Image (spheres, helix red, strand yellow):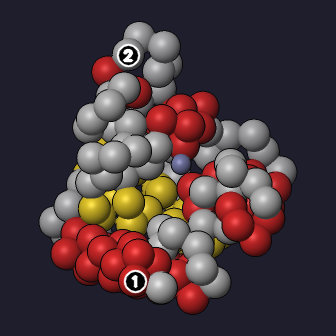
């Protein structure tokens, strides 16, 4: 692909930081149509005592607040794990143009498995989806995190 800049490195860094905080290591980066990073975050559900504080939710809220608008047309969302159904709907509501994710999530994913949110008529806006970008690194982060939790 020409002219394609990867922001997955930044998302993986956020995932790593999340693991350091004892959060499930998922990181996300929201990129403007011009290629500027509008927001980046990792999961903060434990820190904020908020089950909705997924990385995707945090970056969408921050980017919308920054731009003073309720939608993010033309923007890209980079995330290290396949979004859950809640985040998948939010990405649709925000009119995000493209979703790029690393690892798939057979347990809680909502894009290519489970409810397959974007194949439903209720998803009025369907982003372009690219999966598997730097999948091994994102999957290893999650694997190590859960292995460590089980052994401690
Ligand atoms: Zn989610």
Give the residue displayed 47% in from the left and 26% down from the top. 125
Residue topped by disc 2? 120
Give the residue displayed 60% in from the left and 67% down from the top. 43
Q: Is residue 69 above or below residue 75?
A: above
Q: In this view, does 85 lie to the left or right of 38?
A: left
Which image quadrant for residue 12? bottom left
Residue topped by disc 1? 151
Give the residue displayed 27% in from the left and 79% down from the top. 140
Q: Estimate the x, y position of residue 28 in percent, counting from the top left.
A: 51, 66
Residue 63 visible: no
Quadrant for the N terminus in the image: bottom left
Label 2 vs label 1: CA separation? 40 Å
Give the residue displayed 22% in from the left and 69% down from the top. 135
Q: Estimate the x, y position of residue 42 in percent, counting from the top left.
A: 59, 72
Crowdedness near tag 2: few (<14), some (14–19) or many (≥20) residues, C-alpha within 10 Å: few
Disc 1 element? helix
Q: Mark 2 or 1 closer to N-term?
A: 2
């Amino acid at each position: 692909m020409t002219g394609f800049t990867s922001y997955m490195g930044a998302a993986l860094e956020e995932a790593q930081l999340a693991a350091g905080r004892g959060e499930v290591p998922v990181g996300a980066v929201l990129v403007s149509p011009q290629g500027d990073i509008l927001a980046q975050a990792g999961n903060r559900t434990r820190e904020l005592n908020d089950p909705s504080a997924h990385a995707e939710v945090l970056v969408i809220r921050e980017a919308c607040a920054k731009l003073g608008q309720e939608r993010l047309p033309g923007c890209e969302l980079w995330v290290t794990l396949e979004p859950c159904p809640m985040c998948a709907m939010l990405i649709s509501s925000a009119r995000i143009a493209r979703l790029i994710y690393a690892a798939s999530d057979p347990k809680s994913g909502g894009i290519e498995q489970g409810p397959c949110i974007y194949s439903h008529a209720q998803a009025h806006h369907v982003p372009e989806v690219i999966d598997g970008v730097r999948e091994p690194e994102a999957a290893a982060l999650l694997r190590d995190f859960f292995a460590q939790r089980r052994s401690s």
